[in-house]
Image (cartoon, helix red, strand yellow):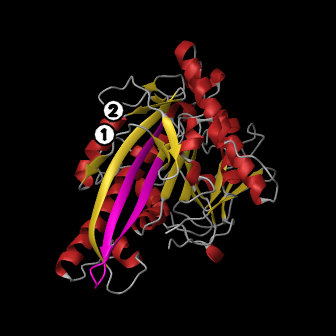
Amino acid sequence: MPSAEAPANVRVLVRVRPLSDSETHGRGGTTSSCSSSGILSLDNGGRSASSPMDFGGGATGGGGGNATVSINDGVGSCGYGSGYESDSHRSGGTANGGAGKNFQFDAVLGPRSTQADVFGSVRGIVEAVAAGYNGTVVAYGQTSSGKTHTVFGNGGGCDSDSAGLVQRSLKALFRSIALSQAESATGVSADDGSNFLETSFEGDATDMIRETTAKASFFEIFNEKVYDLLSGSLETALPVREDAARGVYVDGLQEVEVNDTEEAEIILAKGAANRQVASTSMNRTSSRSHAVFVLTLRSVFTNGDGLSKVRTSKFTLVDLAGSERQRSTNATGDRLKEASSINSSLLTLGNVINALVDRENGRDRHVPFRDSKLTFLLRDSWGGNSKTCLVATVSPAAASASETVSTLKFAQRAKQIKNTAIL
């Protein structure tokens, strides 16, 4: 029988990108009075930058979080200095310069944080997937806030310093699979702490992993249509369907079997190259679609009597297209239509989260999952059978204050949602 953990809140990590040169010196060469430190103060609650967040349920699965982001509504004064510039590697108090807004999360990483720091914080999701749970990481934020860099890096392999969340997660998962397969074949433990599959499996002592297979899929949602990024025909939209056995799925989506990190990275690179991007005033390579990468693990266990059982888990990583304000991006024509579609689907996601939070507070609310393909396909990730982490990326620039506040409010609201992950 499947076993369910006690409900646990969605975990939220906030990452602040560095100020760009134009933000530091002001557009058009005029120095901004706010640009040297930005408008944020950060306090990671005494955690080191790469300390893993706890993704357990029950007593540890509450809605708390002692990492704090403070933002000043009066950005003209920009009364934040030492707390922001101290970066994510410093633990200690906030530098809140008086009146301002405070937001609490599970972890906060500053502009000097590394890609390794981000993965270290959300590593628990990977461990949960290897143990048999579904795990989802969602990157959310305004355009040009660093989402795609955080998720996919700069196109390097899993061993490069710039490798993103997905590459690092794939490396950890396949290392765990390889260790477990070796132990099954030899009967000798070679665990160095990377074998989440073996150490996390709760069963009879005679249970062993006989075989684990992995399949990858990669699709985008562009203008409310779903496209397979691994297909040779990128002009054919795929239908979204639902049935009792499979749940919500994309009909006709390719799933490619991958045997190791290198093969998975080839699939990842192929899909990323096919994704819709375009230039706007805020971002030269702005993502115009929501990208969803899914790695499905199927592990077959056998016990001393020769009886087998199968466990399936999914690792889902979502890079949402950035929310946009037309006056900031100067979007026109097709770019403006795309921005309207992006903002519409993100609005539906916000409505879903608001409805789920209202339900948590005892109100009878309809949750509009079906109002967009994004929310319908990610139904299990919000309030369902998944351990979920929201990575909210924000800009420290005064010019982006409104979007930053909006992102932080969204993230704080999402943190109140409870999921029940089933093993």
Compared to residue 354, the image places residue 285 above or below, namely: above
Query: Are circles 2 and 1 on residues that touch, CB within 8 Å?
Result: yes
Where, by quadrant of the figure, is residue 116 drawn? Answer: bottom left
Q: Is residue 25 visible?
A: yes
Label 2: how many Cα within 10 Å (few below 14, some 14–19, many 20+): few
Quadrant assignment, res 37: top right
In the rendered image, residue 227, in percent from the top left (x then y), is placed at 42, 31
Tell me residue 392's x, y (percent): 58, 48
Task: Establish if 268 lies above or below 258.
Answer: above
Residue 193: numbered disc: none
Q: Which element type, helix, strand or loop, lies under badge 2?
A: helix
Instruction: Spot the residue most to the top.
Output: 333
Residue bearing mark 2: 273
Secondary structure mostly taken by the magenta-highlighted segment of the chain: strand
In this picture, which residue range is highlighted in magenta? 290-317
Identified at 69% across, 48% down, the residue is: 353
Inspect the image, locate mark 2, and give the three-letter code of the amino acid beneath it: Ala
Q: Which residue is mark 1?
A: 269
Q: Is residue 305 left or right of residue 134?
A: left
Q: Say left or right for 243 vs 64.
A: left
Q: Nearer the viewer, residue 25 or 162?
A: 162
Q: CA distance from mark 2 to mark 1?
A: 6 Å
Residue in the image at 24% along x and 56% along y:
260
Q: Amino acid at mark 1?
A: Ala
User: Does residue 271 sit above or below 299 in this rendering?
Assistant: above
Which residue is more in the foreground, 37 or 362? 362
Q: Residues within 10 Å of mark 1 (few under 14, many from 20)?
A: some
